[in-house]
Amino acid sequence: MINDVLADARDRMGKAIEATRREFGGVRTGRANPSLVENIKVDYYGTPTLIKQLANINVPEARLLTLQVYDKGAVGAVEKALRSANLGLNPANDGNLIRLAIPQLTEQRRKELVKMVHGKAEEGRVSVRNVRRDAMERIRQARKDKEVGEDDEKRAEGELQKLTDQFVKDIDRLSHEKEAEVLEV
């Protein structure tokens, strides 16, 4: 029973780390990266659809992203979604291809992006702590239902705390790496 709870918590915490990593991928760093735009939703004939499902995203140069939209009728919708995504980028559309030039980041914009990274890291830490809270409740309920003893409950809580600390440390490491990437000139 306790091993199942801990395994489930480990799995869910791993998913929280992956979600945080994806969130960090969407933070602009001054270099072109497809993850910057691939999760933006486009209103495609009334259905919210990810850009990566509507276009081929390429990085021909260090500071340029190109999007080759599969459906020519959706080029305008993709361009509109890119403009409204608040990335600070100005898409150039020639009818077939959308170009996104990545400008050099200013000092002020870098600081704003670092704050954004810290916010996303905190969301990740909160997710991990929520998983810990749920697992603790399940362990305590098992103790109340007399499925496990008090010693097993204490041991499981200790293991769960170690697991939580490890995943929070991983999120902090990812946050510091992304912060260094954003501040790199």
Image (cartoon, helix red, strand yellow):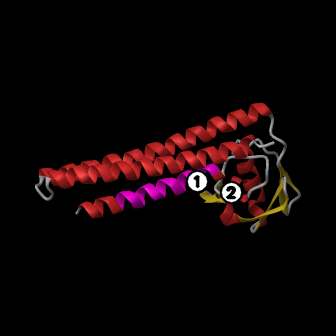
The residue lying at 47 percent from left, 58 percent from top is 15
The residue lying at 75 percent from left, 35 percent from top is 109
**Where does residue 72 sit, x and y in percent of width and height?**
79, 65
Q: Which of 84 and 3 is in front in this view?
A: 3
Q: Which numbered circle lies on residue 35?
A: 2
Q: Is mark 2 on a helix, strand or loop?
A: helix
Discs 2/1, front: 1
Q: What element carries label 1?
A: helix
Q: Which numbered circle lies on residue 144?
A: none
CA separation in Å, label 2 and label 1: 11 Å
Residue 13 falls inside the magenta stretch:
yes
Q: Please state if 94 lies on the left or on the right of 110 as rendered.
A: right
The residue pinned by badge 1 equals: 21
Q: Is residue 84 visible to the viewer in this orientation of the structure?
A: no
Q: 10 Å neighbourhood of mark 2: few (<14), some, or many (≥20)?
A: some
Q: Is residue 101 visible to the viewer in this orientation of the structure?
A: yes
Quadrant occupied by the N terminus: bottom left
The residue lying at 60 percent from left, 45 percent from top is 175
**Where does residue 52 sit, x and y in percent of width and height?**
68, 63
> Which residue occupies the extreme left position in the image?
146
Q: Nearer the viewer, residue 1 or 96?
A: 1
Q: Which of 109 and 178 is in front in this view?
A: 178
Report the magenta residues as a range.
8-24
